[in-house]
Amino acid sequence: MMNGFGMGGMGLAWIFWVLLIAGVILLAVVLVKAFNRNATDRHGPPRTGAGPAREILEGRYARGEISTEEYQERSRILEEDGR
């Protein structure tokens, strides 16, 4: 007679264990992604010059907004300021 629990108790136990396992897997995935993101940030390519300012300058040059001479001048200034 299943000790008075019947199938209702057994069904709840299965739901509990499935949810528990899914939660543990989800937690593991989130932690792995978080650690990978931090590791990538730490071990990414080294930045030279002024960082974001350098990226903006390179983007403007790539789009043709500034000339080669202006790019070289501003790049030199960023390198001097970065030291």
Image: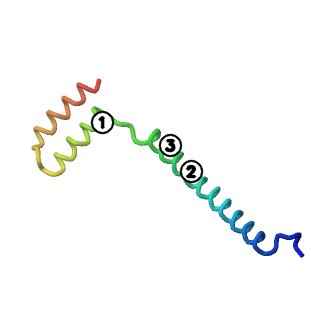
Q: Residue at x 64, y 56 (%)?
A: 24
The N terminus lies in which quarter of the figure? bottom right
Q: Earlier in the sequence, mark 1 or mark 2?
A: 2
Q: Which mark is residue 7?
A: none
> Mark 3: which amino acid?
Ala
The colour scheme of the drawn protein is rainbow
Q: Is residue 65 left or right of 36 when viewed as pictured?
A: left
User: With respect to residue 44, does 48 lie above or below?
Assistant: above
Q: Earlier in the sequence, mark 3 or mark 2?
A: 2
Q: Is residue 5 left or right of 48 when viewed as pictured?
A: right
User: With respect to residue 23, does 70 lie above or below?
Assistant: above
Q: Is residue 11 left or right of 73 when viewed as pictured?
A: right
Q: Which mark is residue 39?
A: 3
Q: Residue at x 67, y 59 (%)?
A: 20
Horizontal and vertical percent position of residue 53: 24, 37
> Mark 1: which amino acid?
Gly
Q: Residue at x 21, y 47 (%)?
A: 59
**Mark 1 near mark 2, Cβ–Cβ under 8 Å?**
no
**Residue annotated with mark 1:** 51
Q: Secondary structure at mark 1?
A: loop
For this rendering, which residue is in front, 46 or 30?
30
Q: Earlier in the sequence, mark 3 or mark 1?
A: 3
**Residue annotated with mark 2:** 32
Q: Secondary structure at mark 2?
A: helix
For this rendering, which residue is in front, 5 or 75?
5
> Disc 1 versus disc 2: distance between alpha carbons?
28 Å
The C terminus lies in which quarter of the figure? top left
> Mark 2: which amino acid?
Val
